Amino acid sequence: MNYDRVIVELLDRIAQLEEKVDALEKSAAQRSASAASIIEEDSPKTRDKTKYVIDGRTFLKNRLVLEVVNKYVHEHPEISFEGLQQVFFDKLQGSFGVVRKRNAIEPQKQIRYFFKTDDIIYLADGTAVVVSNQWGKDNIKSFIVFAKSLGYEITEA
């Protein structure tokens, strides 16, 4: 067996692998820098206070959702809680869901929902419903697209 040839082939393979590792390290560093700049651009320096208009009235994100759910209930007065939850399905909001029965919310989680007397929505059967107030710039986008599919005209103020 020609050991010199084997050694030369191994050294050649090592050189090729080193080149690939260098290229991968550069690529990873570029992706890292790119991700850092995206995070920096997306990270909120201040709270997002984008306002939205529906029916000529202006609302912040969370109040917009409350208004849309309220309008929907008024337009569908016989809707049950289960029906309302099917329309405003949980994944629209995320971990808290869009609507919940008021009496099903644990006291420590009540701050995540509109619990003031004027904000509670009552269904025809007397069920008291609360709406999540946990809306950010990402989940509000999908909610607005969904609300528009229901026929609501919403624009950014």
Image: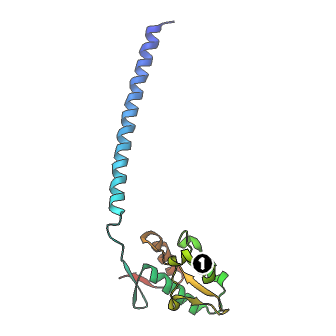
User: Residue 152 or 34: which is nearer the viewer?
Assistant: 34
Please name the residue that numbered disc 1 is placed on: 105
Coloration of the structure image: rainbow
- Figure quadrant of residue 155: bottom left
Is residue 151 among what the camera can see? no
Left or right of residue 55: residue 77: right
Q: Residue furthest top?
A: 1
At 48% from the left edge and 74% from the top edge, which residue is drawn?
134
Q: Can you give x and y, in whole percent of width and height, for residue 63 in the image?
A: 45, 83
Is residue 52 among what the camera can see? yes
Quadrant in the picture for the C terminus:
bottom left
Left or right of residue 136: residue 41: left
Name the kind of residue labelled 1 in the image. Answer: Ile
Question: Is 43 located above or below residue 112 in the figure?
Answer: above
- Figure quadrant of residue 19: top left
Q: Can you give x and y, in whole percent of width and height, for residue 102 in the image?
A: 60, 83
User: Residue 50 or 109: which is nearer the viewer?
Assistant: 109
Q: Residue furthest front?
A: 107
At 65% from the left edge and 92% from the top edge, which residue is drawn?
126
At 42% from the left edge and 23% from the top edge, which residue is drawn?
14
Q: Can you give x and y, in whole percent of width and height, for residue 141 in the image?
A: 45, 73
Q: Can you give x and y, in whole percent of width and height, for residue 82 in the image?
A: 67, 81
Marks counted in the figure total 1
How packed mark 1 is, by other alpha carbons closer than 10 Å (few <14, some 14-19, many 20 or more), is: some
For mark 1, give the secondary structure.
loop
Question: Is 11 located above or below residue 95 in the figure?
Answer: above
